[in-house]
Amino acid sequence: MRHLLSTAALVTALFATPAIAQHQGHTMPMPAPAPKPAASPAPAPAPADPHAGHVMPAAPVATPPASDPHAGHTMPPSVPSAGPDETMDGMDHSSMDHGTTESADASPGPDMETPPPPEAGSGPPRAADAIWGAEAMRESRDELRRTHGDFPVFWFQGDRFETQARKGRDGYLWDVQGYYGTPTNRFWFKSESEGAFGERVEDFELQALYSRAITPFFDLQAGVRQDIAGPNTTYGVIGVQGLAPYLYEVDAALFVSHRGDITARVEAELDQRITQRLILQPRAEVNLAAQNIPRLGIGAGIDKVEVGVRLRYEIVKEFAPYVGVEQSWKLGRSATFARASGEDPSVTNYVVGIRFWF
């Protein structure tokens, strides 16, 4: 046991000797002491004045302003500067590029559409018949014509339906007309009558006319006229009726009787709207004859002139009462015939009536 301990001590000494020899001659540094807490820094001294010890010069004394060299002189008035047009008069602008702007007229505008090729119109005139059938397309075209084109309409108007108060005897008058047909082709009927209360009818005529549109605002009319009161006379009629410029309603007709008598009549009237319901209507009528017709009391030339004005109030568009005044004159030989029969060739009528249509 003792021998084993000796051996262990010997081995330990052998291994420890080189390590000790390795550190011989070396001075081991002392461990640094723990740092003390930093003290509050002392306030920095005030910076030294850079001007300390310098003598500052005294402030300069203000110098009075120099005298104006123009004082006491009268200055000539300033010349206005020339305007841009005056200053540019002498300049040559031909070499300057001001930028050209094409006028609106010079603009070529959008390109025109290319015209369709010639073969575009070479197909059948009713190509839809090949798809839907001729019978189906015929019904469709008829419906289109009825709803958007030449469809028939019935219209009737009492233009003047009135009583007339005048000197000596009061009278009455009616002037009605209407049509049935399309905007292009119509059947017109007209009736006009005049007389005095308690006496026989003086004038009573009926017209039946075929009317054909010749312009957007005028129709050409032709037909017959029959006078029932007085001598029974039949006339052939040709005339025009429509809307003239400035909204004048015009009705002009030429009459040729079965006896060869030629007469004519021109009527014109204008609606002047005062309010939406109150309308003033001036009216004029001129009757002419190519020859004297003693049995009818008509003289050659201007037979009769009527001028009047009526003021109506439209209770509804289809019904309007009115009042007015109308003056009529028989002229020339017609005035002579009227005096011979005891009539006054100049008559003033005060009228009250109604105007209606449906």
Image (spheres, helix red, strand yellow):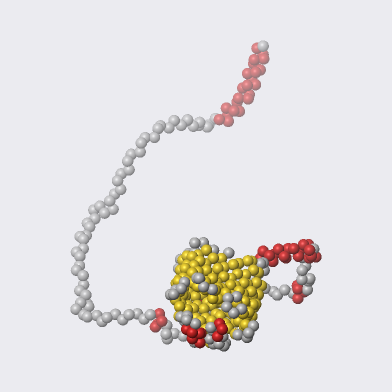
Q: Is residue 57 left or right of residue 132?
A: left
Q: Quadrant of residue 200 in the image?
A: bottom right
Of 127 and 39, which appears nearest the observer? 127
Percent from the top left, x then y, of residue 281?
48, 72
Of 204 and 47, which appears nearest the observer? 204
Percent from the top left, x then y, of residue 133?
80, 63
Q: Is residue 235 left or right of residue 196?
A: right
Of 110 and 251, which appears nearest the observer? 251
The C terminus - image quarter: bottom right
Of 136 and 225, which appears nearest the observer? 225
Placement of 30 over or under 231, stated as above or below: above
Placement of 45 over or under 123, stated as above or below: above
Percent from the top left, x then y, of residue 18?
61, 28
Q: Is residue 270 visible?
A: no
| Residue at (54, 30) in percent of width and height | 24
Q: Quadrant of residue 347 in the image?
A: bottom left
Q: Is residue 89 visible?
A: yes
| Residue at (58, 71) in percent of width and height | 177
Q: How many marks?
A: 0
| Residue at (25, 52) in percent of width and height | 52
The N terminus - image quarter: top right
Percent from the top left, x then y, of residue 112?
65, 75
| Residue at (60, 85) in percent of width and height | 261
Placement of 318 over or under 10, stated as above or below: below
Q: Is residue 176 left or right of residue 344?
A: right
